[in-house]
DNA sequence: TTATCATTGTGTCTTGGTGACACAATGATA
DNA sequence: TATCATTGTGTCACCAAGACACAATGATAA
């Protein structure tokens, strides 16, 4: 199907397969070069970026819709995702945006379910940066990682959605396996610390961090040190998943 | 308008004023006689209870919809409410329930927006029990408080919604003014402690509780003791709202 | 009037977790 | 072989929280 036909069909007939007035937007976090990243789509015909989003099939669980969207943009399967907020401001109006988009594509249409008001449910996902193959959808010209602290212009309230996701990531830090999801299988103590520092947005004492983390018993020390680094080579660790999950029940105890 | 006409109009024309496929359900907590209560509606023609719920007007903020529902069931205005989860299981199907309900009312209808699938957004509210005037809606035969630990049979997944609300109430205890919302203006230390014990579902040491609470500076000691009680009369307190809000920023520090 | 008693109000002691900081070990680089 | 930034481990002081003792209160009963 050509690009225009696909868009046209979506605007004309989408309401036959999707629920109305509801969309899902995903805030997909990754960690790379000591920076927290988020996956964004560049909207066609505009210099604006958007969160990966989509709609809920008529008989689909909303969580499955989020998983489907994640898979389509990253190729990743079976990732823990979590809804965190519904954005329902009537002024967020996708109406103007969608009408403009359709005009840019060159399709004429007077009525469409896409011109109606949408509530959007925000989901977060934490993924291993190195495993992601960013894939744009048919509304987008590009799919790229952006540093969460230097974001481009974004459509609608997507900036808001992202900030809210960031806050809940911080406040849930002690109860979610952010390390397990955002780091590769084996990693060093400084890498883990950098991750926590980035999310908490403050410095941690290296020695106290190590003591605290070791005390939780969530790590297994591997018999292997990082190669090819200047100065003392740090040890590799991996997560002890059983203890990790147990520890998260009671919270890890990091304060903002 | 007669009861049947009202129902009939709602099923036939509701989609002209409300968003489709989305409903709002409210878990309204109160505290009375040392018990945590929740406000429920008895469904007409059935021995089942439901959370107060409703729909979102086409140009209405979802938060305003929740406030409107709360006001209609309790008479209360300007209460802090919070969305906590979207329930989206396709099997939660309001379809069967609504068809049956309409049949019971004695109205014939083949198609209705009310037969479609609904996602439901859960909201919590904490209210002063003594100020509430329970008012049933037109679908309901009664509106009453129930102890959260001895609930009657409930429709759909409303039991689930309530349990989820209870969990989030517990986990947000340190960051929300539950005391201010659930207690009358002036109250004694044992009353406040009972509230916390009820929500946390465990005993607290009386002396440590007092020390901790006093330490937060969220209370103002009044020059007045409770009258007509056996034994030593406890002092009355009220909240120092300014300090309360400040203290909640950093969390109160109660553990489950 | 006075003793009783359950409950409230206040203080002390101990312990465990955390922040601040010292020092030794490592291993590539000069 | 010396240098040096970084990692790994240990110590100390402090504070918050739990456990518990005891005095104060004021209605009730003797």
Image (tube, coloured by chain):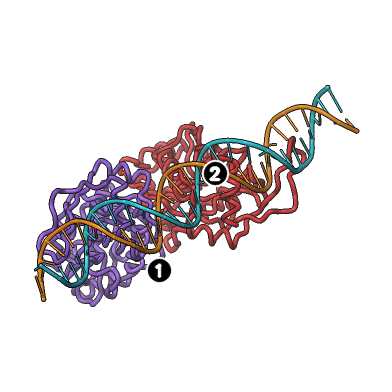
Chain colours: A purple, B red, C orange, D cyan
**Which residue is tagged 1?**
A91
Q: Is C29 above or below relative to D16?
A: below
Place residue A154 in its image quadrant: bottom left
Place residue B154 in its image quadrant: top left
Label 1 vs label 2: CA separation?
Answer: 39 Å
Task: Tell me what residue is drawn at x 29 percent, y 75 percent.
Answer: A153
Residue B135 visible within the image = no
Q: Which label sits in the foreground, 1 or 2?
A: 2
Would you say B205 lies left or right of D5 here?
Answer: right
Mark 2 secondary-structure assignment: helix
Task: Tell me what residue is drawn at x 23 percent, y 69 percent.
Answer: A146
Front one among A159 and B204: B204
Measuring from the top left, give residue A163's x and y in whole percent. Answer: 35, 65
**Which residue is tagged 2?**
B196
Front one among B29 and A220: A220
Front one among B6 and B136: B136
Mark 1 secondary-structure assignment: helix
Q: Which mark is residue A232?
A: none
Asked if labels 1 and 2 share a chain, the reply is no
Q: Quick one: label 1, few (<14), some, or many (20+) residues within 10 Å? A: few
Q: Is A227 above or below relative to B125?
A: below
Would you say D22 lies left or right of A132 here?
Answer: right
Task: Tell me what residue is drawn at x 32 percent, y 67 percent.
Answer: A158
Q: Is A98 above or below relative to B63?
A: below
Q: Chain of mark 1?
A: A
- Locate the C terminus of chain B by quadrant: top left
């Amino acid at each position: 199907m050509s690009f225009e036909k696909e868009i046209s069909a979506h605007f004309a007939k989408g309401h036959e397969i999707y629920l109305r007035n509801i969309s899902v937007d995903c805030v997909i976090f990754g960690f790379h070069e000591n920076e927290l990243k988020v996956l964004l789509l560049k909207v066609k015909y505009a210099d604006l970026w958007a969160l990966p989003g989509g709609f809920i099939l008529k008989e689909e669980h909303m969580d499955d819709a989020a998983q489907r969207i994640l898979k389509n943009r990253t190729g990743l399967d079976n990732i823990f995702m979590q809804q965190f907020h519904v954005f329902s401001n009537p002024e967020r109006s996708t109406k103007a945006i969608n009408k403009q988009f359709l005009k840019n594509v060159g399709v004429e249409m007077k009525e469409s379910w896409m011109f109606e008001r949408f509530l959007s449910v925000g989901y977060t996902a934490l993924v291993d940066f190195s495993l992601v193959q960013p894939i744009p959808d048919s509304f987008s010209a590009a799919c790229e990682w952006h540093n969460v602290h230097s974001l481009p212009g974004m459509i609608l309230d997507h900036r808001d959605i992202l900030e809210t996701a960031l806050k809940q990531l911080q406040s849930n830090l002690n109860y979610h396996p952010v390390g397990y999801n955002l780091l590769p299988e084996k990693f060093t103590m400084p890498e883990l610390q950098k991750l926590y520092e980035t999310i908490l947005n403050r410095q941690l004492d290296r020695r106290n961090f190590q003591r605290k983390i070791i005390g939780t018993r969530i790590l297994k020390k591997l018999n292997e040190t990082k190669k090819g680094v200047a100065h003392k080579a740090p040890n590799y660790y991996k997560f002890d998943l059983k203890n990790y999950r147990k520890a998260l029940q009671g919270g890890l105890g990091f304060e903002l």
